[in-house]
Image (cartoon, coloured by chain):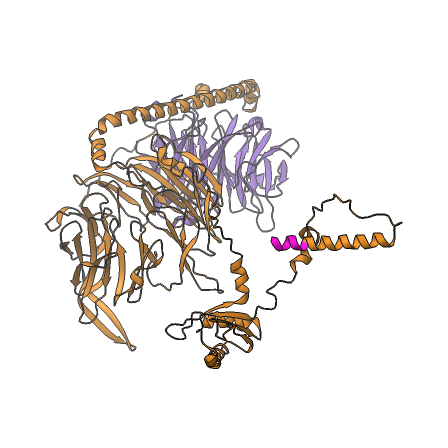
Chain colours: A orange, B purple
């Protein structure tokens, strides 16, 4: 600022002197000059902004100069030597045109020098090449561009705190949990995916909250705790939330195909198979949901199933696996944990415990080394349990939702046959059988039990709350469903075997106890609702061509969907009570998808939840009376509606009847004066006829 | 009650009709012999032999003396009901798709298909003194139908008008004095397969391939009600004594072989006439229902299906007791 003022003063002085001169020469000339007290309030920037911008700077023409600090301070006699060393070093970066070594009056160097290169590019190169160059133990060069000094000079002495980012109020994202009757929301994608609707599952009829055309380009998804609603577009992903479902965040990732939320909704992972060629290739991006910032990206060539990266339950860690490698990263730094990956030869799959920072993985069998399931603790990397397994074809890990148990389903073979076939080994497993290895996570040293099943397994599912698991096993037509109970210190016990069932999928209620056995792959769509307290089949129902079964997050309702993605006709959904009573059917052409809005885990402690359960009678009476009132109101409305319809129609019919009566003579004329208005009206012309009824048939064989 | 199964046709039923008193039931099928049955016990009374192609339509006059049939052998024939003999025949250049006696049964109407070079035409024929010479007679009137062909037809009350349903879902009323279109509505989006009056002829129900049946006022052609299903509707009939509509159809015949009967939805569905609410279904056919008819006394109904069967259902007492709250 100081400089600018000087410059202004200078120009003003010039003008003043000129004026004086002109006044002296010709006095008749009209006076164009400003009066004495005039203050020029237009700055040069305003008048000649474009020219002032190109005003020469002190540093012009010195872009090719660098400042080297930290050179030895030496006396004049050793100067030549130093110069040679420095010149040699710095000529690596380019042609040097000039050097300057400031000296003290005694002729000693001052410990710094200036070097001028033939052009600015060489200077820049010298900075990157030789900055922090160690000449010897005591001397390290600090190399800077001469122009940089100006840049650093201008840093204000006073530190100014960065301007705070304007806080955008996201609104109450959890408003839906405040719904007084705690009705759940669900979203439906209809009309070939062109229309997306969000409904509130109120009694007796659901209420439509939002409907939008072309809200998504492929599919939709709720975040795991239900806070955000996600739509997928060609350009990226959008998150919506709040009572009006306004857009809360946008994540640009062209061609995004898969998305995944971290369990606590802090981060979003997007994957797109096509990536931009410029810059570092990346196909997987991790975003911070609150700020919308890209946190880290990867370029993965994964053979594994989506999700390629898997999160620990508290969003603190995430892991991914490559061939023989397992990498665990930590947040919020997004760096590799302890800066190195695990070397695990033959790792095939891994998964996190849903409640603890424990990672389970398994390694395939390799000649003499048995297959192995290992549990490690993160971040300590302590191996807390491992189990060797033989004759393993495949493993599947199933965590119980509350993290108390881990079940590893092991596909094993009794014999292996290798056939030489075009220089390629064709491996056939003969005689498959199955093991369920149950890890008791809550007990000391994690004991492992195993259950063996000889028949083929179609499905496995843990009870989300509780200690039961169900499996579907057997071969057609003898499909059985077995329920096992897990207890501490005991091998899992078979609780019940339901035989000759028609099902291939298991759906536990999120609250446990109830389970739906469904036949989804064939077109029949048989559904069985089972109470696993007494293993009573409460209801046997059918939703023809059903493709999906979805429990609501509270375990009160079950929805079966017949999706357009599977069947072309009769698409729609049916709502059932958890006991299997049909509540509502909804048919719509080209119905695609139904998703319940998830709920975060309850805030009540276990004790409080128990208390609610104990006093259920008190609460249920309240809710029942409320439901009754609502349904009676609805039926009253319906009756009202019908009555008006009936009255309208009767009025219309009355009018018609009048004209009809008027026309009677003309009708009689057309039919030779025979009254045919009623069947009985022509009674006098009736004939009697005898009709025989076939009562029974007797066959007598005459031989 | 167990329905009566009328077995006598070799191929799909195309149309069934009761006579005015309801003691006889006439049926036509894609084989070439229409049948007549006792509606009370399901015994076959006789057949009408002579057609050489698919019989698409039939109608019986109010005295039950004559039967009118239209067939794919490019002819419409008139039969004596009492002995099953052919009285006369009227030749056309293409299939006869619809036919009907007027209220007085002095005249008949028929319509032909758009085929090869022939266009769709509506013929009005004098059948008062019909005999073998019918063949050489000229029709009273020929109305060429420009555009989508006629797929179903009704005589208006008092023999003054004809109401036709078209392939594109249009319903048109023709004045026979002028031979001109006087009114038309386009409420359906696809072919109208059937039109049936109520007892008085003051309103009628249409059945359309667009999966709906609709109720229209006869005079104004105003659409009064809509009955929605998930499958093409081939036929709909109005109860003469209750405020009920029976609607039948199902997955189209050409798709049936590839789907199971459950996908087909071949049930007869009962709707309330005014509230448009479905309240009952009757299973039975294993192909789509092609034709439905209430008995004139309203105590039974008959359905003819693509499976070749005609089923006569007598209602249980509970049917008459069931009431809607209003």
Q: Nearer the viewer, residue A130 or B44?
A: A130
Q: Which residues are magenta?
A: A1-7
| In the rendered image, the vertical position of residue B13 relative to residue A350, given as above or below | above
Which image quadrant is residue A53 in? bottom right
Is B83 on the left-hand or right-hand side of A471? Answer: right
**Rendering coords of residue A146 (x, y %):** 54, 67
Which image quadrant is residue A421 in? bottom left
| In the rendered image, the vertical position of residue B253 relative to residue B104, given as above or below | below
Is residue A323 shown to the viewer in this render?
yes
Asked if the stretch drawn in magenta spans residue A110, the answer is no
**Rendering coords of residue B78 (x, y %):** 52, 37
**Rendering coords of residue A650 (x, y %):** 48, 20
| In the rendered image, the vertical position of residue A629 relative to residue A496, given as above or below | above
Is A626 on the left-hand or right-hand side of A147? Answer: left
Dominant secondary structure of the magenta stretch? helix
Q: Which residue is outermost to the left?
A: A490
Is A601 on the left-hand or right-hand side of A658? Answer: left
Q: Which residue is outermost to the right?
A: A28
Is residue A191 shown to the viewer in this render?
no
Q: Nearer the viewer, residue A221 or B88?
A: A221
């Amino acid at each position: 600022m100081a400089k600018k003022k000087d410059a202004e003063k200078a120009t003003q002085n010039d003008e003043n002197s000129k004026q004086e001169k002109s006044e002296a020469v010709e006095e008749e000339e009209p006076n164009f000059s400003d009066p004495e007290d005039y203050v020029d309030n237009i700055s040069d920037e305003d008048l000649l902004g474009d020219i002032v911008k190109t005003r020469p700077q002190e540093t012009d023409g010195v872009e090719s100069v660098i400042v080297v600090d930290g050179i030895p301070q030496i006396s004049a006699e050793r100067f030549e030597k130093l110069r040679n060393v420095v010149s040699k070093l710095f000529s690596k970066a380019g042609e040097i045109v000039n050097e300057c070594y400031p000296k003290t009056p005694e002729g000693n160097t001052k410990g710094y020098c200036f070097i001028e290169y033939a052009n600015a590019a060489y200077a820049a190169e010298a900075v990157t090449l030789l900055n922090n160059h160690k000449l010897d133990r005591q001397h390290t060069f600090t190399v800077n561009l001469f122009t940089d000094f100006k840049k650093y000079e201008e840093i204000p002495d006073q530190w100014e705190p960065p301007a705070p980012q304007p806080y955008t109020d996201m609104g109450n994202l959890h408003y839906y949990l405040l719904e007084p009757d705690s009705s759940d929301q669900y979203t439906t994608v209809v009309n070939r995916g062109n229309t997306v609707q969000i409904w509130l599952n109120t009694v007796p009829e659901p209420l439509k909250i939002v409907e939008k055309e072309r809200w998504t380009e492929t599919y939709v998804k709720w975040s795991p705790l239900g806070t955000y609603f996600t739509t997928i577009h060609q350009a990226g992903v959008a998150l919506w939330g709040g009572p009006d479902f306004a857009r809360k965040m946008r994540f640009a990732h062209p061609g995004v195909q898969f998305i995944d939320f971290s369990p606590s909704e802090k981060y979003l992972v997007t994957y797109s198979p096509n990536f931009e060629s410029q810059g570092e290739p990346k196909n997987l991006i991790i975003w911070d949901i609150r700020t919308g910032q890209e946190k880290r990206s990867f370029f993965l060539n994964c053979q594994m199933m989506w999700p390629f990266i898997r999160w620990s339950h508290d969003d603190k860690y995430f892991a991914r696996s490559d061939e023989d490698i397992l990498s665990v990263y930590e947040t919020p730094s997004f760096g590799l944990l302890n800066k190195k990956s695990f070397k695990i030869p033959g790792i095939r799959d891994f998964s996190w415990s849903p409640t603890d920072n424990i990672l389970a993985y398994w390694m395939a069998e390799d000649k003499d080394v048995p297959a192995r399931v290992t549990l490690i603790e993160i971040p300590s990397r302590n191996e807390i349990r491992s189990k060797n397994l033989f004759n393993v074809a495949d493993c599947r890990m199933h965590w119980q939702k509350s993290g108390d148990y881990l079940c590893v389903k092991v596909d094993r073979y009794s014999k292996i046959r290798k056939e030489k076939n075009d220089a390629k080994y064709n491996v056939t497993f003969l005689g498959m059988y199955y093991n369920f290895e149950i890890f008791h996570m809550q007990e000391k040293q994690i004991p492992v039990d195993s259950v063996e099943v000889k028949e083929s397994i179609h499905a496995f599912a843990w009870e989300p709350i509780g200690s039961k698991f169900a499996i579907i096993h057997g071969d057609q037509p003898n499909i059985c469903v077995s329920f096992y109970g897990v207890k501490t210190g005991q091998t899992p016990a078979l609780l019940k075997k339901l035989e000759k069932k028609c099902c291939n999928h298991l759906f536990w209620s999120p609250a446990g106890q109830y389970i739906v056995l469904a036949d989804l792959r064939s077109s029949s769509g048989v559904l069985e609702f089972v109470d696993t307290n007494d293993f009573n089949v409460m209801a046997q129902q059918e939703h023809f061509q059903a493709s999906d079964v979805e429990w609501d997050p509270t375990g009160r309702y079950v929805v079966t969907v017949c999706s357009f993605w599977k069947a072309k006709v009769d698409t729609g959904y049916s709502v059932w009570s958890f006991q299997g009573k049909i509540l509502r059917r909804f048919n719509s052409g080209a119905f695609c998808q139904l998703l319940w809005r998830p709920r975060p885990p309850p805030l009540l402690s276990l004790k409080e939840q128990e208390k609610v359960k104990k006093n259920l009678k008190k609460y249920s009476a309240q809710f029942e009376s409320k439901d009754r009132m609502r349904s009676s109101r609805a039926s009253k409305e319906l009756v009202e509606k019908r009555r008006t319809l009936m009255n309208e129609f009767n009025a219309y019919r009355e009018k018609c009847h009048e004209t009809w009566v008027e026309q009677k003579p003309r009708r009689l004329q057309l039919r030779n004066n025979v009254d045919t208005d009623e069947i009985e009206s022509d009674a006098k012309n009736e004939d009697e006829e005898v009709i025989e009824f076939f009562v029974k048939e007797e066959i007598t064989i005459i031989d | 009650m167990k329905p009566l199964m009328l077995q006598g046709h070799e191929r799909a039923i195309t149309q069934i009709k009761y006579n005015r008193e309801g003691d006889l039931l006439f049926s036509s099928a894609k084989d070439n012999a229409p049948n007549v049955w006792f509606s009370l016990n399901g015994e076959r009374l006789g057949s009408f032999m002579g057609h050489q192609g698919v019989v698409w339509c039939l109608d019986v006059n109010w005295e039950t003396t004559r039967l009118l049939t239209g067939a794919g052998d490019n002819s419409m024939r008139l039969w004596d009901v009492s002995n099953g003999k052919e009285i006369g025949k009227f030749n056309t250049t293409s299939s006869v798709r619809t036919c009907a006696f007027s209220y007085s049964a002095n005249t008949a109407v028929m319509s032909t298909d758009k085929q090869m070079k022939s266009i769709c035409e509506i013929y009005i024929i004098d059948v008062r003194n019909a005999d073998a010479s019918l063949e050489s007679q000229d029709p009273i009137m020929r109305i060429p139908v420009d555009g989508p062909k006629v797929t179903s037809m009704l005589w208006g009350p008092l023999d003054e008008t004809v109401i036709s349903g078209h392939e594109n879902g249009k319903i048109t009323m023709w004045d026979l004095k002028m031979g001109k279109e006087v009114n038309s509505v386009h409420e359906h989006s696809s072919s109208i397969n059937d039109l049936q009056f109520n007892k008085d002829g003051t309103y009628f129900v249409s059945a359309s391939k667009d999966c709906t049946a609709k109720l229209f006022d006869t005079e104004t052609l105003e659409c009064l009600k809509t009955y929605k299903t998930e499958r093409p509707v081939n036929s709909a009939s109005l109860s003469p004594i209750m405020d009920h509509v029976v609607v039948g159809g199902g997955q189209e015949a050409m798709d049936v072989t590839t789907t199971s009967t459950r996908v087909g939805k071949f049930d007869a569905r009962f709707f309330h006439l005014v509230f448009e609410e479905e309240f009952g279904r009757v299973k039975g056919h294993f192909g789509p229902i092609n034709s439905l008819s209430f008995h004139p006394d309203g105590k039974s109904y008959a359905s003819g299906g693509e499976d070749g069967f005609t089923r006569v259902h007598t209602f249980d007492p509970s049917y008459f007791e069931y009431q809607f709250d209003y």
